[in-house]
Image: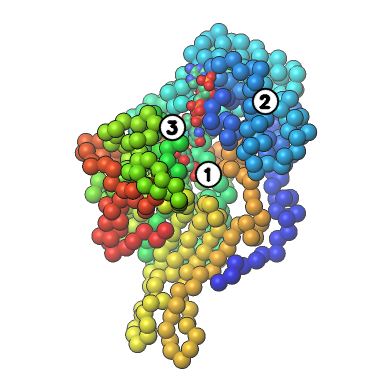
Amino acid sequence: MATTGINVSQEQVEANKCKENIPEPCIVVIFGASGDLTKRKLLPALYHLEQSNLLPTDFAVVGVARRDLSATFAHDMHDGILAGGGVDKDEAKLDKFMERVQYFATEFDNDEGFEKLKAFLADLDKKFGTKGNRLFYLAVAPEFFADITQRLGKHGMTGEEGGGWVRVIIEKPFGTDLESAKKLNSEVNSVLHEDQIFRIDHYLGKETVQNILVFRFGNGIFEPIWNRNYIDSVQITAAESIGIEGRGPFYEAAGALRDVLQNHVMEVLSFVAMEPPDSFEADAVRFEKLKVWKAIEPIRVEDTARGQYGPGRVGDRPVVGYREEERVSKESQTETYAAMKLEIENWRWAGVPFYIRAAKRLEKRVTEVVITFRQPPLHLFKGSSNKGMESNVLTLRIQPDDGISLKFGAKLPGPTTNVAQVEMNFSYADAFGKSSANGYERLLLDAMLGDGTLFAEREGVETTWALMTPILEAWKAQKVDFPNYEAGSWGPKEADELLARDGRAWKV
Ligand SMILES: NC(=O)C1=CN([C@@H]2O[C@H](COP(=O)(O)OP(=O)(O)OC[C@H]3O[C@@H](n4cnc5c(N)ncnc54)[C@H](OP(=O)(O)O)[C@@H]3O)[C@@H](O)[C@H]2O)C=CC1
Ligand SMILES: O=C1O[C@H](COP(=O)(O)O)[C@@H](O)[C@H](O)[C@H]1O
């Protein structure tokens, strides 16, 4: 069935990208400025905000890292922004933006460096009119999160001393299990108030993830049926076709559960399952998310499956197995595929299984939520071909082909009551044009505005870790015969069996 066109002009779409408020003057200070995240995501996102006129006029960016890159940093970032695509290649505007991008070299454990950084920022306040307001972004390995935060405290850079607001964005992973997450929370909370801490999960910056709430609560035909009376099961898949992209040491310690399932997938799940919040204010949304996670029954290890990819082909390209990737152990027990069944024991969801999975090197990149509805009585169709009599399936496609589709049965033309499955499809690109937003734009903007709605908070992070930690421990205690799936396939047979036991199958 054809995509439904909606009469929205490109001008309306563009006009909607303006926020009511432009942030106050400020400096965005990025620790880890020479890293991959800064170059590929953060600087392009900031520049895109500039292009959309969403940054304050009095504004600067300071990159901080260990090596002295003062001479080349702006040039490298300029090229990175151009190479990244998705931004209007307006060289003059970009040059002007880059004039406000500065670099400062220090080791993260160097007190003298922090003292100098403080003075450097104060000088920039005078030059750019940024009024002492700071958004620190910790785009660094997790072992530095607490250290950097505490050094900011030690050197009087957390806003306690007055002079402007201070906020700190902390990258993921926020901890590696419950204990480490609690420790990290105590460490950062010892120098920062909770409303200064912005724990980022870039999935919450994705339009299609935010749209889950609009779709559920803003549509009279879907809102009433979003519960156990109508829904049979829910699947959330975050599949990637890429491997670990040179991040061997990081991934060896992380694995698919820590890297994606505990954070991105659990955030998406909370949007799918939460009760309507009182408003879209941070406290109201976070409260409802927390209630969902708290209602999840302890996960049984029998309700999980894990895998690791061996050599295979992705598309028409041969690829190596995980154990042959650079800086990965030949006996690695790290999972590159994690799946589990969750049960949310509350009034809305009792009895509805949620199957979730995240993995690398699958056949294709696809992140989506699949809602399967209960079937009506089918006795009327006894004499008909049953092929089309499948459950209605609603798919919320988060990426790459953002949109929503609904499968239902329709009468096959002819003198029978035979039924065929058809699909109605809404595509973001068709309705609104292609978006270049990568999630980080919205989140950087919100942090500058002090809006924490789309960020994780302390108790939420600890609650998801509390659910996942027993599984990590059980997995660690039991060795597996890896690899158990071929790169470019749809994962290990154990994950298929997890659903087959319940008479179901993965729908992607
Ligand atoms: N890359 C990505 O796509 C994503 C990354 N993240 C998270 O973002 C964070 C950063 O990731 P990524 O950019 O990939 O990391 P990189 O390893 O690419 O960059 C690390 C940065 O930290 C700096 N650094 C390391 N040690 C020190 C030190 N002792 N003193 C001063 N600077 C130091 C490095 O500086 P130098 O070059 O001078 O050594 C570099 O700028 C991580 O927490 C990661 O989990 C989250 C989602 C996606
Ligand atoms: O946080 C992470 O996310 C990416 C996937 O992000 P996406 O926006 O491309 O879906 C993942 O590749 C990476 O391993 C993980 O650290």
Q: Amino acid at mark 3?
A: Arg
Q: Which residue is mark 1?
A: 204
Q: Name the residue rendered at 40%, 43% in the picture.
A: 319
Disc 1 to disc 3, C-alpha distance: 23 Å
The spot of residue 7 in percent (x, y) is: 70, 64
Residues under numbered marks 1 and 2 in contact, where contact means CB atoms less than 8 Å apart = no
Q: Quadrant of the N terminus?
A: bottom right
Q: Nearer the viewer, residue 409 or 1?
A: 1
Mark 3 or mark 2, earlier in chain = 2
433, above or below 101, in the image: below
Q: Residue furthest top?
A: 112
Q: Quadrant of residue 34?
A: top right
111 lies left or right of 49: left
Q: Quadrant of residue 500?
A: bottom left
Q: Name the residue rendered at 57%, 30% in the picture.
A: 38
Secondary structure state at the residue bearing disc 1 = helix
Q: Quadrant of the C terminus?
A: bottom left
Asked if residue 443 shows in the view, the reply is: no
79, above or below 381, in the image: above
Secondary structure state at the residue bearing disc 2 = helix
Q: Which residue is mark 3?
A: 247
Ligand 1 contact, mark 2 (Cβ < 8 Å): no
Mark 1 or mark 2, earlier in chain = 2
Asked if residue 249 shows in the view, the reply is: yes
Say which of marks 1 and 2 sits in front: 2
Secondary structure state at the residue bearing disc 3 = loop
